[in-house]
Image (spheres, grey):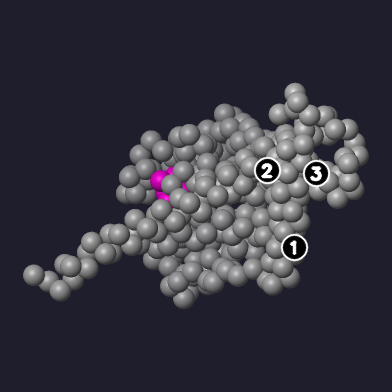
Amino acid sequence: MSGRAPLRPLVAMGRLAGRAGDAAASLLPGLAVAAHAALAVLAADEFAALGWPLPTSFDTINVTVVLATATMGLVAVLQVAGRAAAGSVALRALLRYGRRPLPPVIHDASAELGLDGRVDVVAAREPFAVTYALARPRILVSTALTAALTPAEITAVLAHEREHLRHRDPLRLLAARLLCGWYWYLPAARWLGRRSALRRELAADRAAVGSAGPGVLAGALLKLAALPACPAVAAARPPGDEPGSLEARVAQLEDGRPPRQRMASVPLLATAGVLAELAIAAICCAAMSQILPVGGL
């Protein structure tokens, strides 16, 4: 028996633990938003029952903080959802009026990567490839892509988008943008939103390297970055997938490992301070619910 055999259960357990940790990490922001929203409803009920201001200025300030931050978060979430909807409408309009048959090079690359029936082509002057749609994602490319890239580079780009398609990244990234939008006033939330988008790009690049090699993919990235962007695609692109991410992506292709991503100390400390104030406000809001008159929540 191989000496590695006894380690296999431990490796499997480690992977399961890692997945459980990732699942917990993805659930915590949603739970935090739900708790914040529930406290905001409670704060509104307290003001309705006890009037404004509350018995003490401390209570008034903290309950107001809970209600105001939740309101700002809701407005920001609606703005994120509105931008996402507008981007989706722009892409679908582009597809509706510009659909074209798959050029031979796109057809061959799609068949090679197992993407038959999952790739759409539109006529556009700007070269691009993007994964779109939430429930059933598809890949949208432009006819200009065939003129801008070599066949090998087109295969690399489609392999990159295939990774986004497999993991339903449009849906995952929209969920992350909505969660981060709720806490937009936290520096850490904005950083995490950009980091989430960049991590998915880096993961898709790593998957594409196996199909085309790092040099080919890097060449495709640099060519596309130097060309004008399609307005409809730019409108649908999530924050974080921006020119600044190109350096990190090329660095990963050069070094063979993803670059380290660390938040600066000042935004981190500012976030900790705001979270501490929110925690105090939440405790105060919950405590105030105990003195609501009969007929309150």
Q: Which residues are magenta?
A: 160-166
Q: Nearer the viewer, residue 145 or 280?
A: 280
Which numbered marker is on residue 273?
A: 1
Where residue 8 appears, as percent x and y from the top left, is 22, 64
- Dot 1 or dot 2, earlier in sequence: 2
Say whether residue 53 is left or right of residue 241: right
Say whether residue 16 is left or right of residue 130: left
Residue 287 in which image quadrant:
top right
Q: In the displayed image of the protein, which residue is found farthest to the top?
A: 295
Q: Looking at the rendering, in which quadrant would you find the C terminus?
A: top right
Residue 110 in which image quadrant:
top left
Give, as a three-letter code, the residue at label 3. Answer: Val
15 versus 214 height, above or below: above
The residues bearing labels 1 and 2 have C-alpha atoms spaced at a distance of 17 Å
Identify the residue at horizontal 48%, vertical 34% (top origin): 135
Where residue 288 appears, as percent x and y from the top left, is 76, 41
The residue pinned by badge 3 equals: 63
Give, as a three-letter code, the residue at label 1. Answer: Gly
Q: Nearer the viewer, residue 47 or 139?
A: 47
The residue pinned by badge 2 equals: 36
Q: Residues within 10 Å of mark 3 (few under 14, many from 20)?
A: many
Q: Residues within 10 Å of mark 1 (few under 14, many from 20)?
A: few
Q: In the displayed image of the protein, which residue is found farthest to the left?
A: 1
Indicate the secondary structure of the residue bearing disc 2. helix
- Dot 1 or dot 3, earlier in sequence: 3
